[in-house]
Structures are given as C-alpha cells and as structure tokens.
Image: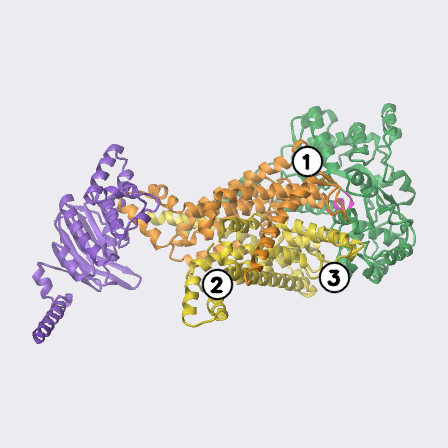
Amino acid sequence: MFLEIQNIVKNFGQEQVVKNLSFSLDAKKTLSILGKSGCGKTTMLKTIGGLLSPDSGSIRLNGEDITHKKPEKRNIVYLYQEDLLFPHLNAFENIAFGLRLKNIPKSIITDRVNHMLKSLELENQSQKMPNQLSGGQRQRVSFGRAIITNPSLLLLDEPFGSLDAGTRHRMQGLFKNLSKEFEISSLFVTHDLKEAVLMGDEIGFMQAGNLKVYTDKNEFIADPETGVEEEIKFWGALAGLEKNVDLKKH
Amino acid sequence: MKNRTNNFIISLFIAIGVIPFAAAFVYALLYSFGIIGIANDGFTTAFWSAVWSSGTFFQSFLYSFSIALVSITLSVGGALWATLKFRKQLEQKFLSFILYLPLAVPGIVTGFFTFQLFSKSGFFSRIGYQMGWISQPSQFPDLVNDVFAFGIVLSFVTMIMPFFLLLFLNVYKNERVEELSVLAQALGANAKQVTQRIFLPILIKKTWVIIVLYFIFLLGAYEVPLILGQESPQMLSVLIIQEIKQYDLDRISEGYVIAVMYTLIVSVAAILLFLPRRKPAYET
Amino acid sequence: MYKLINIPIVIIACVLCLSCGEENTSNNEDLKKAAWKEITEAANGTTVNFMMWQGSPAINAYINNYVTPTVKEKYNIDLQISGGQGPEIVQLVMGEKQANIKSGQVDMVWINGETFFQLRKVNGLWGPFVKQLPNAVYINMNDSFINTDFQQPVKGMEAPWSLNQFAIVYDSIKIENPPKNIPELSNYLEQHRGTFTISNDFTGMTFLKSLLAELGGSPNSLDGPFDEATYQTLSQKLWDYINAHKKYFWKEGQTFPKEQSKMGQLYANGELLLIYGFSEGGIEEKVLSGLYPKSTRGYAWENGTIKNSNYLGVLHNAPQKAGAMQVINFLLSPEAQLKKADVNGMNSNTVLDINSLPSEWQEKFKKVAKRKYGPEMSALEKNAIAEPAPEYMIRLYDDFRKYVIEK
Amino acid sequence: MKLSWKPFVLSLAVLLILFPFAYLVLLSLASDWRFPDLFPSYIGLKNWSKILSSETGLLTSFASSLLISLSVAIVSTVSGFLISRAVFYHPKKNTLTLLAYFPYILAPVVFAACLSFFFLKMGLFGNVMGVIIAQFIIAFPYALLFFSSFWNKKVKSYEDLVATLGGNRWQTYIKVLFPLAKGLLLICFFQTFLISWFEYGLTSIIGIGKVQTLTIKVFLFIKEANYYYGALSCCLLIFPPIVLLYFNKRYVFKKLA
C-alpha cells in the first residue's frame, strides 16, 4: 500500500479528537472523506501532514515510516479551505513558490509554472495579485502551487467550501482532470455528500474521531449513518410530489 | 527539537522582559527596608513609616491621579467630539498628515513650548501687554508651574488628543460604525440616539483598555511635570527621582519606598486590566 | 524547560563577575608619595573623565575650547567631560561603592562644600594630593576662604579652583534702592509684589544662610560646628518671616522655582526684579550674551553674603589618578587661571595669590580687563561671610520644603 | 449655514498644530527677545552657525542620538518580532503577555533609577552601550506587544503551508513572514525609534551625563536658561521624526488609520 495509517491517536487535553485511526490508500487514488465540522478530520489531516504529532500510532508513506519526520521533509502538501495565497506575490510567483524553495533553475521554473497556468486555465492571470483574482481563480492558483511541487500525497481540507455552487462544480471537474494529469494521490475531506461521492475513488465517513472506509460506493450508500439514504428519500419524495402536481394539472 | 528552540526563545523573553523588572523591584524593595544602601545599616521599617506618616506620597498620588484623569477626560472627550463632527474632513490627505505631526513632538519639547507660550513673560503675556490688558508680567495669570497644573494638563492634552483622534477614526472605520449608524437610522433612531447608542458605546468599548493604559502612562509622566510642575505637590516620577537623588543621604531610602508603592499600584492596575481578558488588548 | 530558563541568568551572572574583575592598576598609596616627574609620566597618554556642572555656556566654552585641546597638546591627555553636580556625583560614588567597583566611571570632579562633606562621609575622595601639585605653591593656603570648605578643613583632599562671592542681582533701571537687609527686604516685597522668590536649590539655600546669619545678629553668628539649638531658634524666625511675607513672593509664594537658572530666566524676561547667585551674581556673562538687560547690577548683603571657593577632587576609585592630578595642576597654572579670569569668557576669580606669582604673571593678572556690568569681588569682600557647616544647608533644604513649600 | 463653522474650526486646528513648529524655528533664529516684545529684535542664523561651528557638541549629540535610536529600533523590532512569535503561540500566552505589560507601563525613569545598580555592576553605566541596553529593555515590551495581533490563526496556517511545501524555518521567515509583516515591522521600527529618540529620564540616569543625547542637551539648555539654543535643539529633535513620518506615511496611514 502507498499510504498506511496505523492506530493513530491524537488528544487535545482530555479530549480524544482522533480515535485509533487506521486506513490505507493506493498510489494515484483519491480517498474522499465525508464528515461534519468538528468530527476530527482537520486534526487527522494535520497529523498526516506532520503539522501535529500523534500521541501514538504510525504513518507509513511509500514504505517509509514518516511518523516523526518534519513536515517540510514529508513531501505531503496540506491545502486549507482558504486559498491562503501569499498577498505579496502575484499568481505566477505564488505557483512558483514551492519550486523557488528548492533552488530549481529559473528557466525550468518558468516552463513548469507556465505549463501549470495553462492546465489551470489561468494563462492571462499570471501577473495579477491575489486580491485581483476571483475566488475560483484563487483556489486554482492554490491548487497549482501545491501540485507543481509534485507531492507524494495531497491533503485537501474542504477545498471548495467557500465557493459558490457553479464555481464549485467547475472546480470539481478541474481537480479530477488535474489528478489524472499529474497522477496525484490525495485525501479529500468534505462535508458535502455529493462531492464526496463524486471526487473519491474510495469513500470514507468520519464521525466523532472514528473513520470508516467503505469497500465500494454501494456499501457507503447503504450505510444509514452517512445520510445518503435519507437524501435519496427526500429527493424521491419531492420528485413524487411533483409528479402528482403535474398529474393534477392535466 | 522544535520545543527546545521555543523554550529557549521563551527564556530569552524572560531574560529581557521579566528579569530586569523583577530585579529592579527587588532592589527598590531591599533599599526601602534599609537592607542595602551605603548609608543604611540593616533592616528597618523606619523609612516606610516616615513616608506613610508624612503623607507626601498620598498627596502626590492624588495630584498625579487628578491630573491624569482630567487630561485623559479632556483628550478622549475632545477626540470623540472631533471624530463625530469632522470625520469626513479628517480623511483628506493633507489633514490626515497634519494630524500625525503632533506625534513627532516629544514631551520635553511640548513642555518647553508650553512654558514659552504661557509663562508670565511668555508669548501670550506679551500679546496681553501689546493689547494693553496687562502692564507688567506679574499680572498675567498663573498658567505654568501653577497650583492647578494648567500647563501640565494642557501639554498632556496636546500630546495625546491627536493620538486618540487617530485611534477613534481608525476604530470608526474598522468597526463599520458608519454602516451601523445608517442601519440604526433606518430602524428609526434620531441623530442623538445614534450618537448615544451606537457611536459612543462602540468607540469606548473598543478602546477603553488603551484609554486606561494612557492614563497609567500619564500617571508616571516625567519630563512634562519636571518642566511645568510646581515644587509641591509633585507628580510621582518627579517626586521619586527627587527623593532618590537628594542631598540628605540618610533619606534616600524614602525615595525607594515611594518607588515600590508606585510600582505596586501600576502592577495591580496591569493585572486588573490584562489578566481576565482572553485576547491581548493591544492594538494600534 | 527550567534548565533552559536558567541560561540567561547564568549569562548575566557571568557578565557580572567578569565586569567586577577589573582591578585598578595604579597603585594608590605610592602615587601619594611619588615625585611629580613620575606622575607626569604616568599621566601621559591617559583618558581622564571630568564630571562637572555644565550649566553655563561660558564655562563649557572654557573647558571645551581651551582646556581640552591644551592638555591634549601639552600632556597628551584626553579630557572627557560629563555633566553632573553635587547629588549626581555623590549618587555615582555611592552606587559604585555599593557595587564594589574598583575602577570607576569618573576620575575628577568639580565640587564644593556640601558635596565635599558628603563625599568625605562615604570616603569617596582620594588624597591628600594637593601638596604634590607644583602649582599649589601659588595658592595661599592660609586664606580661610580657601583652606576651609563649609567649616571643614580641606587638608589637601581637594584643590581650590576658583574663589567667588554670592551677590544680589537687580535691574538698576527698575529698582532704585535694592534691599540690603531684612527690614529693607520687607519694604521691597510690599512695593514690588511678585518680583522676588527663593529657588529651591543650592543657590536659594545659600541666600537663606545669609538671612539666617543676619537673624543671628552678626556676620559670624553661624561660624563653627553645627549647633542644633542655634539652628532651631534662627530657622524658626526665618520661616516665620518668609511665611509672613509669602503672599508678596512670586506667584504669591504658592510655588518656588526649582533651580537658580529658572530664576535667571524669570529675571531675564522681567518677571523677577531681584535675584541672586554665586560668582558675584554671574552678571557679566549673562549681560554680554544678551540674556540680562544692560542695566543689571550686583551688590552684597549688608550683613554679608557667602564667599567660598569651589574645588577639584579626585575620586577614590578613579582609574587615572595621575592623569587627574596632571589636569588639576594645569587648571591651577597661572596660564589657565588667567584665561579663566577673562571677562568675555568664564570670568571667574583666580585662587592664586597674585603676589606670589612670578612678576611677568603678576603684570598679566593686573592687566585683566575689569567687568563692565557686574561687581568685582574686591568691591564685595568687606561684606563676605564664610560658609557655615554643611548640616545647615542640608537642614535648610528639608525644612524649607517642610515649613514653606508644602505649607 | 449649519456647516459653515466647521471649516473655520478646522483651519484653526491646523494653525494650532503648525504654530509650535513655526514658533520653535523662530525662537531658534532669535536672540535678545524679551518681554514685552512680540517679535525678536534679531532674526538670523547666528545660533545655528554657532552650534554647527563651535564645540557645543550638538552635532555629536545628534549623531549619538541617531546611533542609539537606530540600534534600539532595529534590535527591539527584530527581537520583538521573533520572540513575540514564541510568546503568542505559547499555551500560557496570557500570563506571558501580562508579564510583558509590567515593564511596559512602569515609568522609564523610575525603572532606570531602580535598575541603575545592576548597570553599574555590569559596567554599563555612563556609556552608549548601557543606554542602548536600557532603552532596549523598555522598547522591547512595546515591540513584543505590538506584534501580538499579527500571530493569528491565519499566519499560523501560512507557516504550516510553507512547511508542507517543503520550506524550512529560515525560508518561512524570509519568504513569507517578513513580507507579510512588512508594514507592521516598519511601524514598529518607527515607534521604537521614537521611544528611544524621545527618552530623557532613563537616559539621564543610565548615561550619568556622559552620554549626551539630544534630549539631554535640550534639558541642559533649558537649565542654562538658553531658550534659543533650547529651541534649536528642539528643532533637531523634532525634524527627523517628521521626515521619517513623511516617508513612512504610506505604511503608517494604511495600518494606523
């Protein structure tokens, strides 16, 4: 397995926020994790990314134990819900940021960033400062900035949470394409049921510090805890109602 | 690894920010009890009882307290009024730069300048003479080194009112008082009600810690009362330094008694002001 | 964590130990017996710190533009000046004693009686050294205004630098008959309300001493060691007198100026019409610099005003004692004293006994231009009294605050 | 009609603010100006040329003030920034903040009087180094507290982001934290510069008259009753901050107003 999490526990004071977390992920796959706010998903991601250290348990990436490695050495990028673009850098420099840290020759950086801008459909925005970009554009720059460093694993924490429905829809498609193009392995955390189903190769559900990963989507849909059934019932009922209304009209 | 550097930095903070204060306080405390000091010969409470019974400290404290209170009230009141009346005009480029100018004037210059203007033979007295209102300097009213500390209060007000005005303009903008006022008016409030229920409460609530902080600063002010104060009573800092640097070597400890009392008072004020708050109150 | 917190403390402690380790290199006792030649050699190339009152442009100009370059040229000594008088010097010495600092900040100081008394009290002075100075032969050590400082024998612990007398200063255009005794002062106060005050400093207290002596009935009434009973009776009379006339004082006696220079300012701009000061009132320089009106004149009190010397001392922990001695010797030289007497400069009376000087110098001193505005000391000398014991000054300070200012 | 009094009051206020500056310049150019003359009988460059030519030491004072204030401002801004990070990310940050407030609100002159023994002991009395350290001790809490609002969640997120992108501590500071805090750093530098530049009481005690900064000179001239030189040194004292303010105005305005 590419990523193997075993028995991770994380407490804040008395409160156990992540309880005995174990799961694994294949390379180039996306595991989407559904969870309400406060269920411990952010803590889980930060622990995997190395921004928090676990109280017990181990994390293995590509066969190597990285449990105690510094975040900057893990090659795992954590993306916040906010785009967190550097306000003092333009779009181009924001994307180039991770490469500049690694002292890569300038010409290579320029080529790669330009290529990335193209993939992100941002060719004409490269010189704009973050405050001149729209919400969706900012989120795309943020993605590009993470993906261009070629991370082993991408951790996405509600990346589209602050976008409007239309933009959100387009971004989901874009991310799918990027994942394919750049062969990304990722954990995708969201509280949106549809998004979880749409984005993940596999689906997990997190509740009160416990994560359950489903073997396939049907199992996920069948589990009453996830709320999928309820959703289907609602829409079904609504559809039935509309049918009735239609019938009456005629 | 990360923890160790952090602890090192915290201990650095303690070395720069805490140890000097603690050392100074302990030194003053020991001196006030006669435990150290060349002219002293061992533990005694004589200096404390001397200061306690003479009443100089309480007089001086009361005096400083009143001056600081009056100055703060006038400054804050004036700044609030100006914010209310002149907010739009003060946002112009030229005026806003002019408003910053007083911040570039230290107390020592303000004191010097106030003396030049308001002393009995100062600029205003000369105008009075040229206008024929007075015929000699002694007829000019007492405005510096005077009983009511007019000169000190005037200097303080000119020093801190511009600061508060800038602060209030800033808060006004950040707290969106404008929008809230419009909202209140839409809900049927008249101008007076907007001022009393929106404008004043928001501005005061957001800035009261800074107001109290400046009050404490004024309580310990040194340069201005040194130039413009009278010989008795004196403001606290002036009194402390005068007692510590006096000719009578046997009474130097009394200066440290006053220093200890003053330090205790401002420390208690700091604790009351900053301990219960979750967030640090500091802004500007 | 706790171990780490201790690190800065340890560092501070180390610095403390290190800085206290400096030992004084010159051997103090040997220096007191050394021949002048050895002292000159030891002084060569040193940096001497001189702490003095810097409140007068004329004095500063004399030191900065004449003394400093000359000692550099003649003796290869770098003279550094720092500002500080009486209490500051005493504070520094006490602080350094308390911190057990063997090699102090300051080598030589400019002092007079009260500071001398305090420095002697805390053993802050080094000496005796005056006899070793070659130029000391020109000083008449039998003159009681020179060999006694505030009723204390100087005993070679400080070298006299200038002689001066306290004088009353007034504007001869505005005041025709200035007061010369206490009853006249009462009349003056009633006629010219608000134009007189007492500065709460050395100068003001010196004026009070003149009044105290007059209340005592004779110019010599305060001579000898401090006498509590005399002080009590006379000071009671003094406070009664001042309090009775307080309402005629400047600002109706509700406040008093902090220092003499403030009084000078008030006189300069016409608020006060009658002031006083050392160095025969300090009139000449202030008139020449345009501060005082040209009609300013000075005189002595009928019962006498204080005449005294001011002195130069070497501190007990001075790092450069030889250098300080060399500079002091230079300051006592006929050349430096003549320059100091210049009416357009520092304008202070020499301590040298002119008759004992070589004849060429006698001539030069006799040719010194006379003052145009201020009185010569010779004109006041018949009304001179000696400084009473220092305790009078210290008590007057306390009681003036207690019975007059705070009342 | 209702608005007509406002411009009048405003112009008056502007005049009132500008008047002291003009008056001080006039006084520094004057000589022989006594009651009851409304204007000096002499106006010219006499005082200025004397100050600049002879050894009144004003130029040296100006230079040493500049040296002291620049050192204090640089050291306290940088150390305040770096140390405040550890303090405001610390679990006990409330207690630590409170501790920083004690030296912050104590009158510097009283602080100095009680600290002078230790400065003597460490050989830091009466020299420029001692004055710099003493002023640093009072400017540091200011700088530290100044940055308290900077270290918020968002900045912490930036730091984490840089770490996961592979940046080390040094790169985090140089490439992100310093640029993010640029405006604040400039204001803090300006303010701590002023704290030092305007300091009198503490300097007079720790410097024992050997370190003569401009404020010490101003007092010396006031004591000498030399208004003209006093006004002149006041001018030297005021104009550098105004120049700084002018060049800094862009940042100061943005952040303060």
The kind of secondary structure element at disc 3 is loop
Quadrant for the C terminus of chain C in the image: bottom right
At label 3, which amino acid type do we have?
Answer: Glu
User: How many residues crowd around disc 1 within 10 Å: few (fewer than 14), some, or many (20 or more)?
Assistant: few
Task: Kindly identify which chain the residue marked by label 2 belongs to.
Answer: B
Question: Tell me, what hue is chain B?
Answer: yellow
Q: CA distance from mark 3 to mark 1?
A: 44 Å
Q: Colour of chain C?
A: green
Q: Nearer the viewer, residue C334 or D169?
A: D169
Residue carrying label 2: B203
* D173 relative position to C324: left or right: left
Which residue is denoted by mark 3 in the rendering?
C406
In the image, A182 versus C28, the foreground residue is: A182
Q: Residue A210: x, y in percent?
A: 19, 62
Q: Is residue C103 left or right of residue A193?
A: right
Chain purple in the figure, letter: A
Give the residue at mark 1: D45
The magenta span reads C112-118
Q: Residue at x 50, y 64 (%)?
A: B272
Q: Which mark is residue C347?
A: none
Please tell me the colour of chain D: orange
